[in-house]
Image (cartoon, rainbow, N blue to C red):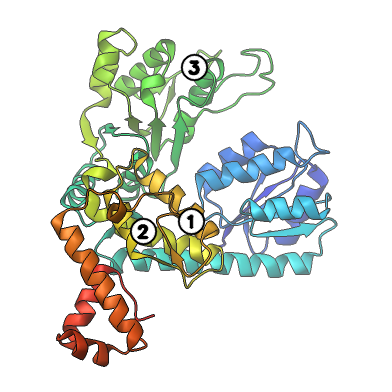
Amino acid sequence: MKPKLLIVDDDEEIRTQMKWALADDHELVLAEDRPRALEAFRLNHPAATLLDLGLPPNPNQPDEGLATLSAILALDSAAKVIIISGQGDKKNALEAVGSGAYDFLIKPVDIDELRLVLRRCIYLADLERQYRELQQTARPDSFEDMLGTSPQMQGIFSFIRKVATATAPVLLLGESGTGKEMAALAIHRRSARKDGPFIPINCNAIPENLLESELFGHEKGAFTGAHMQRKGLVENASGGTLFLDEIGDLPPSIQVKLLRFLQEQRFQRVGGRQEIESDARVVAATNADLESSIKEGKFREDLYFRLAVVVLKLPPLRERTDDTVILAQEFLQRYAAQNNRKNLAFSPGALRAMKLHQWSGNVRELQNRVKRAVIMADGRRITEQDLELTSAAGSGTATLKEARESVERELIEATLKRHSGKISSAAAELGVSRPTLYELMEKLGLTRS
């Protein structure tokens, strides 16, 4: 089976040239602007994307191309995007690669060089996919890219396994940053719809006057600027899953239309009269109190009951503190590799501080703090200062267990230092066996160095 390749360029002649040059080795998908590129990416999940920086409405500037790159990476952070542009100045190249592009080639492109870059790019994407799949089977704390050994998360994983096989709508509740979209994606991947599209949309991120068209599509001439018929996300998600994030912000007029679709699996495009069917499963999410919104008249009660056939509440990170270090280590490994700092490790103080922090921003806050710390850390250890957290040791609120661990940590570190990291000598001085010392070091997050 040929790997899919998405080509995004506003020049029809260039798209045709690319088509003739690459069709033998790839299944090609073509797009000429950002909306069509994102729609094609959602529907086809290409192995690689060739992206022109100069796209309409400003083909002489790189802004639209860079925005398309950012939007593609938001849909799939592992996406492989190769920039192809006539705007070959160093600034655009650095900005594109710095924003996550895999490579940058200048027009006119040498086709042999492009083929070589594509082969390498698709090979790497395939390796990364295999590695992720291997991690899923090898790690007991991992479930569809979600991490956690706490009872709360193991319960979430079990719940997802059960609801994934059904077709009923699912409502995900939880604070911002708890991983509602990851849970929705896990439900999709575990379902019979896994080979269909997974299409996410943030109901709060699109202006109300555009949201109906984005969801349900429009007919040509339905409103000013509707120069052609366009399918909406509900239609594109047929056979797959439509994820409606921030469902509590859905305007009342669109709530009515969504309710009818959930009842009948049918809808009309904006400006249209034809009844269209879509076999899309709806998974919705919110961090708002929908029951309060119903009492205030902001959210329809009948729509709530249609969406809440199955309800899953994701716990905040502060309620599953056992998972904090597991998540932090995963983020550290990921961002250290991206920044070529593979020898980085957390200091004991950083580990203590992370366990005690309240994490009002949940997993997203932890991820952002670790990402910043990888960049800012001076040495080989990430400290609580790098994470912009306050250590429990200096806060005056340490528990007896924490105080005992602090003393053990300092004693073991000092002994290892005196013996230049030699485990046998250090264990003899401390009066414990080598296996016991190894266990203590692992518990306390210490390394021989």
Between label 1 and label 2, give the one nearer the viewer.
2
Please determine whether, in this image, residue 23 is positioned above or below residue 204.
below
What residue appears at the point 64 percent right and 41 percent down from the top-left corner?
68
Q: Quadrant of the C terminus?
A: bottom left
What residue appears at the point 56 percent right and 60 percent down from the top-left corner?
3
- Out of 143 and 283, give the one closest to the viewer: 143
Q: Which residue is mark 2?
A: 350
Q: Amino acid at mark 3?
A: Gln
Q: Which quadrant of the figure has residue 266? A: top left
Crowd rating for badge 1 (residues with CA inside 10 Å; few <14, some 14–19, many 20+): many
- The Cα atoms of the two marked residues, 1 and 2, are separated by 11 Å
Residue 274's disc is 3
- The Cα atoms of the two marked residues, 3 and 2, are separated by 60 Å
Which element carries disc 3, helix, strand or loop?
Answer: loop
Which is more N-terminal, label 2 or label 3? Answer: 3
Crowd rating for badge 3 (residues with CA inside 10 Å; few <14, some 14–19, many 20+): few
| CB-based contact (under 8 Å), mark 1 and mark 3 | no
- Out of 415 and 432, give the one closest to the viewer: 415
Q: Amino acid at mark 2?
A: Ala
User: Where is residue 447 shown, x and y percent of the image?
Assistant: 34, 76
Q: Which quadrant of the figure has residue 132? A: bottom left
Residue 160's disc is none
Q: Is residue 327 left or right of residue 213?
A: left
User: Where is residue 196 shown, x and y percent of the image?
Assistant: 42, 45
User: Where is residue 425 shown, x and y percent of the image?
Assistant: 26, 92
Q: Which residue is mark 1?
A: 373
Please determine whether, in this image, residue 257 is positioned above or below residue 265.
above
- The Cα atoms of the two marked residues, 1 and 3, are separated by 54 Å
Q: Which quadrant of the figure has residue 414? A: bottom left
